[in-house]
Amino acid sequence: MNTQDIDALGLSSGLVFIAIAIAGSLLYSLKLEKDLLIGTLRTFAQLFLMGYILSGVFAFDLEWPVMACFVFMAVFAVWLIRGRAKEHEVHYLMPILAFMTVAYLIVTGFVSGVIVGVKPWWSPRYFITLGGMIIGNSTTAISIALERLFSDLRTRRAEVEMMLTLGADYREASADIIRNAMRAGMIPTINAMMGVGIVFIPGMMTGQILGGADPSMAIRYQIMVMLMLTGSTTLGSLVSVLIARRRSFGKAHELLIRPETTP
Amino acid sequence: MSEPDHFLACTNLRFGYKQGRVVFDRLTISFEAGSFIQIRGASGSGKSTLLRLLSRLEEPDAGAILFHGRPVADYPPPVFRKSICYVQQTPTLIAGTVRDNLLLPFGFRTNRESPKPDDDALQKLLLEFRMDDVALSDHALSLSGGQRQRLCLIRALLLNPDALLLDEPVSALDDESKQSVQEAILTVHRTRGITVLLASHQPFDTQGTPIVSYNITERALVRRNGS
């Protein structure tokens, strides 16, 4: 079965949905019109650019452009995390970038080379798409977890310092905050597993079915993707929170995160 | 006559916040063990910052802090901190009972070797600090400001510290609570011989207990006349 192509006219008529969103924003003074317009432009620009790059990488069929794409995605992910976590005094981004690149490279390599069994394991059609899903979902999970971590360290500073003064080390003084941050990062993925196939049909499966694949094969892929994402977002939330927590305390286990009203 | 034990000392201490305000510059001072020391100064002069520096909740930009003649960096931070227990201006308690709060430090690795007090010992301490109307099973967050402050004092005492660093312990209390907390602090010093380093913007009635008093002025500590 061939996929029905979307021509330029069809694609641009999709903008009617953005018009509805902008009308809603105007009607209720949400002031989101500018963000909606920029978001739409970025969606077109980024995805077309990605399409051209992927076509090039697929055509090359060499290992290094695939790895370069992967590292670029990880760098961009860390940039997004930095923006969302809203903590600029503590330096935690480089170790998280190193972790994401190495850990997710291994995870993606394992999924494509061992579970799917592609040869070579870095085959761009699989490696970049699976890697993109892993990095994308983990970025969301890590951002949520870190935002929660920094926010709790700021608002519960007195409690953390009270424990430090009573002989707690930094791990003990922040144990409860760490648990909450890790849970916050993992819950969206767990909720997605609960609702998948009933509340929504995931994007990858939809894409495969629209692309003409047998639904039973699309299901197997989707299960594999859900398991892979649960593992990688858990790993990302846990390790990132631990890295950021260590960087939030100094040598004397003193809390480096400042409340917003520091003298 | 033996030399006084300057258990805690700062040499050439410099500290400023990132926004650029220098709080201390070349501060050199030592505190004698067993004494009752009051640090006075206007709001924002650096009283709390000094106590936070001494308990390593802030690290100085330059200079050193010595504990019994050795740099504080020689001690594991949790061991050092529980020896000179800093009690915050606003009493901080966890959600739970009075007992949960008093026993909280015994869950930390550094304190696991310390004998955990039983209910009788805790009840005795509550009585000693005039909290006879408080039960160990009461919810800690239901206590009054003065009771919370005394509970924090008792919690610190259970760790047998060499000194207590008290940050404005009575500033936010009404007159009645203020008196009960002042009495509790004096009891700690008199009966247990614990060194007290107290930061306060107002005079502290020591009821005859000798006191060493300093004023913070111009980023330095100046000993007050007649003290």
Image (tube, coloured by chain):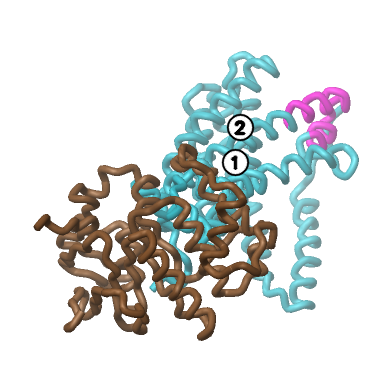
Chain colours: A cyan, B brown
Does residue B80 appear left or right of residue A19 in this picture?
A: left
A102 vs B178, nearest the viewer: B178
Secondary structure under tag 2 reads helix
Q: Which residue is mark 1?
A: A237
- Name the amino acid, label 2: Gly
Which disc, if any, is residue A131?
2
User: In the figure, residue B199 lies in which quadrant?
Assistant: bottom left
Q: What type of secondary structure mainly makes up the magenta span?
A: helix
Q: Say what amino acid the circle numbered 1 marks.
A: Ser
Mark positioned earlier in the residue sequence (2 or 1): 2
Residue A236 lies in quadrant: top right
Q: Identify the residue at horizontal 66%, vertical 48% (top origin).
A: A184
**Camera-side residue of B84 and B63:** B84
Mark 2 Cα-neighbour bin, 10 Å: few <14, some 14–19, many ≥20: many
The front one of B34 and B38 is B34
Q: Indicate yes or no whether the magenta region holds residue A3.
A: no
In front: label 2 or label 1: 1
Question: Is residue B91 in view?
Answer: no
Disc 1 element: helix
The label shown at residue B215 is none
- The relative height of residue B208 versus residue B152 in the rendered view (above or below) is below
Badge 2 vs badge 1, beta-carbon distance below 8 Å: no
